[in-house]
Amino acid sequence: MENELKILEEEFLKDCQQACGAKDAEGLRVKYLGRKAQINQFFSKIPTLEPTQRGAYGRELNILKQKMSAIIEKKLNERQNLEESLDLTYPGIKPQRGSRHVLTTVTETICDIFQKQGFIVAQGGEIEDEWHNFTALNFPTDHPSRDAFDTFYLNLDQDKKNGRYLLRCHTSPSQIRVMCQNKPPMAVISPGRVYRPDEVDATHSFMFHQVEGFAISENINFAHLKGVLLDFAKGFFAKDARLRFRPHFFPFTEPSAEVDVSCFMCNGKKKETKCSVCKDKGWIEVLGCGMIHPNVLDTCNIDSQKYQGFAFGLGVERMAMLKYGITDIRLFYENDLRFLEQFNQL
Ligand code: PHE
């Protein structure tokens, strides 16, 4: 009989360990002290015992019952206290929601437009060497961009074949990497970071983002380039956007051009107040482009007699600044949520 009380007590203590919460405590009370509790059966057994045993057994039972009710009582109280200090109607703490950076979304918007035209995306690396960043792109050995004032060189042993390592100053080396590894036809865009040791001010940063694009095939001409860029301008700026091509020079394209888009703010129509976007010029410079120089194709083992290609490069920060009227490039990098959160819904 002693034994059955021990078993009951052990079972009770085990249940207690697992019990948590008000519901469980109430469950314990029903199971061990309720009407159908085992202990009641033990109590009702008392009259059937030898009279000499009744007193001792009854006492044991009472001790166990008191012990169990003390523990259950305590558990019930614990919950009650906790629930009183815990205001369950109090509004929860809303976790801060992260979102993508405006430069990421603008890069994606730009890439989307070109991907719809059939371009595929290829990522280049931010660490390049002189050969991919300059030489293969037809930069002469004495070109000023190669100067340490204009390019970040890395303090690494130089590659025997490809020269010094550097942080790429444009995304054009991606062209070289793709061209050397693939055969035409190809149409590729390559977004990414570029680095130039420029003094930081409202329109310059030592690091910024570009999207490079190029296509190579037989019979590609300047008209294809114009069509691709016009479609981009209409998709990115405004449906009625127009483009203006101004002759320019890049070592890796010939002929080369700088491209202006018609001002999406004033569309070239003068108003009483000066247009804040184009300063009444009616045009905004947006990118550089041209037909890929035959030297570049040949360097990458693409027969320039057979194949032609066009290439273009645009600045992502500049696109974002124009589109959203942002006047200081530094805002992109300062991680001020008051600025960044304005673009959460893009
Ligand atoms: N790489 C040039 C720059 O950074 C842009 C460009 C790319 C121009 C491709 C022509 C063709 O200024």
Image (cartoon, rainbow, N blue to C red):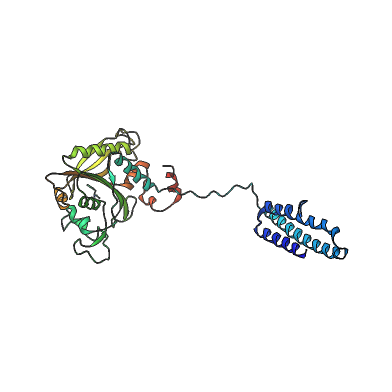
Q: Position of residue 112 (x, y in %)?
A: 33, 41
Is 67 placed left or right of 124 in the picture? Answer: right
Total count of labels: 0
State the residue lying farthest toward the right: 51
Is 29 placed left or right of 314 in the picture? Answer: right
Q: Residue at x 48, y 48 (%)?
A: 97
28, 250: nearer the viewer: 28
Q: Position of residue 269 (x, y in %)?
A: 30, 32
Q: Is residue 290 above or below residue 161?
A: above
245, 327: nearer the viewer: 245
State the residue lying farthest toward the left: 305
Is 142 placed left or right of 38 in the picture? Answer: left
Q: Position of residue 230 (x, y in %)?
A: 26, 37
160, 101: nearer the viewer: 160
Q: Quadrant of the C terminus?
A: top left
322, 223: nearer the viewer: 223
Q: Quadrant of the N terminus?
A: bottom right
Q: Position of residue 107 (x, y in %)?
A: 34, 46
Q: Would residue 118 be seen by someone viewing this image from the given angle?
A: yes
Q: Would residue 282 be seen by someone viewing this image from the given angle?
A: no
Q: Residue at x 32, y 37 (%)?
A: 235
Q: Residue at x 58, y 48 (%)?
A: 92
Quadrant of the rendered image containing residue 9: bottom right
